[in-house]
Image: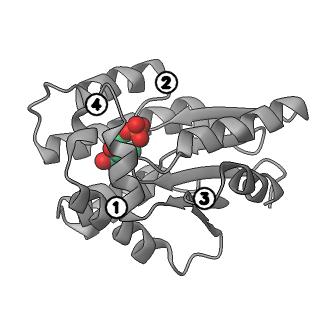
Amino acid sequence: MSKYPLIIFEGIEGTGKTTQINNLTNFLNKNKYKYVKIREPGGTKNSEKIRKLILNKKSTLNKITDLFLYLASRSENLEKIIAKNYGKKIILIDRFIYSTLAYQHYGMNINKKLINYLNNFLVGRFKPNYIFLLTVDKKTLIKRLSKRKNKNKYDRLKINFYMKVQNGYLKLLKNKKNLFLINSCETLKDNKETIINK
Ligand code: TMP
């Protein structure tokens, strides 16, 4: 494997992905590793504009429109950030192709073959080397989501929707050799060490 892997973080709301990514970037900064970090939807200037369109609380865009917008945001990142840095810097991505399968297929029942086709068409040779999937149990999720302020369109979905999405992630990823499951109900410190050690 290249010394500059493509590392992705996946998981539903309330699993602490952002915190763990920040822990990892602090470690990379301290040890002077070269890396770039992006989130999806978002990343490039164009993709951040797309993010606002999708996640706006008042958005009335339908689920198929959202699907194409997530892919549009990914397309911009692939061209402008991932292709340019692949093999030259570590690439960290907060959500990637598996979010689209988990949310748009397992959560919203959009055809899985179509999503797989579009993901593969876009991503091509840029396959993740490490996938960290953060999980949470239902009781903890209810507690964590109730504390969230500034809810976006996707933060307002029902708990059962998120549990469906999480089960989808587990189904999708269970046989992947590069999957590392992180139970976000363990301590932040233990999970931070596990991720950095990997
Ligand atoms: P987040 O960046 O705060 O995690 O929010 C992004 C939201 O977008 C989150 O609810 C998951 C959702 N999402 C999808 O539904 N499909 C996708 O392909 C991606 C990248 C995100």
Helix, strand or loop under label 4: loop
**In front of the other: label 4 or label 3?**
4
Give amino acid for label 3: Phe
- Residue in the foreground of this view, choosing between 34 and 77: 34
Query: Marks 1/4: CA distance?
Result: 20 Å
Helix, strand or loop under label 3: strand
CB of mark 1 near ligand 1 (< 8 Å): yes
Among numbered discs 2 and 4, the one appearing first in the sequence:
2
**Residue beneath the point at 19% across and 52% down:** 158
Among numbered discs 4 and 3, the one appearing first in the sequence:
3
Q: Residue furthest bottom?
A: 175
Q: Which residue is mark 3?
A: 132
Please report contact status of discs 1 and 3: CB closer than 8 Å, yes or no: no
For the residue carrying disc 3, how many other residues have a C-alpha within 10 Å: few (<14), some (14-19), or many (20+)? many
Q: Which mark is residue 102?
A: 1
Q: Which mark is residue 151?
A: 4
28 horizontally vs 77: left or right: right
- Residue in the foreground of this view, choosing between 70 and 82: 70
Picture layout, residue 11 above or below residue 81: below
Please report contact status of discs 2 and 4: CB closer than 8 Å, yes or no: no
Q: Quadrant of residue 59?
A: top left
Q: Residue furthest right?
A: 31
Please report contact status of discs 3 and 2: CB closer than 8 Å, yes or no: no
Please report contact status of discs 1 and 2: CB closer than 8 Å, yes or no: no
Among numbered discs 1 and 3, the one appearing first in the sequence:
1
Give the position of the C terminus as an image quadrant: bottom right
Query: Marks 1/3: CA distance?
Result: 14 Å
